[in-house]
Amino acid sequence: MIPEMTIAGYAVPVILTIIMALIYKFIPVISDRYKALITIGVAVVLAVVSMAYNVAEAITAKIVIEHVLGGIILGASAIGVYEGARTFLNPRS
């Protein structure tokens, strides 16, 4: 059975990208080298918080691993959206 996709599944990386872009704009001392790692870290933390908030059943290692991996994927997709938008808005000649 194919899981139902919702608009939230597509909107979360965009929202995370906007939030992280605002943070990077107002805190310019963060090196470009660490921005991707910080974004992935924030996404993993958000996924674990979501797990603790939404899981009605007992929290098992499988559920924790699924949420941590989902956070890594969310962070990576947010980085892709950020880099794509940055490249589109500031094209190199």
Image (tube, rainbow, N blue to C red):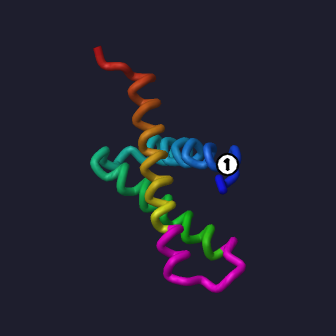
The segment highlighted magenta reads 53-67
Image position of 73 with respect to 54: above or below: above
The residue pinned by badge 1 equals: 5
Crowd around label 1: few <14 · some 14–19 · many ≥20 (10 Å): few
In depth, the one of 33 and 49 nearer the eye is 49
Screen quadrant of the C terminus = top left
Q: Nearer the viewer, residue 72 or 93?
A: 72
Q: The N terminus lies in which quarter of the figure?
A: bottom right
Position in image of residue 88 (x %, y %) = 43, 23
Q: Is residue 6 left or right of residue 41?
A: right
Mainly helix, strand or loop, the magenta region? helix
Q: Is residue 55 magenta?
A: yes
Residue 57 vs residue 76: left or right? right
Instruction: Identify the residue at image location x=55%, y=42%.
Output: 18
Q: Residue at x 50, y 53 (%)?
A: 74
The secondary structure type at the circle numbered 1 is loop
| Residue projecting furthest to the front | 1
Residue 66 location in percent, x, y?
51, 69
Please state the horizontal and vertical placement of residue 11, each as a whole percent of the image: 63, 44
Q: How many marks?
A: 1
* Image quadrant assignment for residue 92: top left
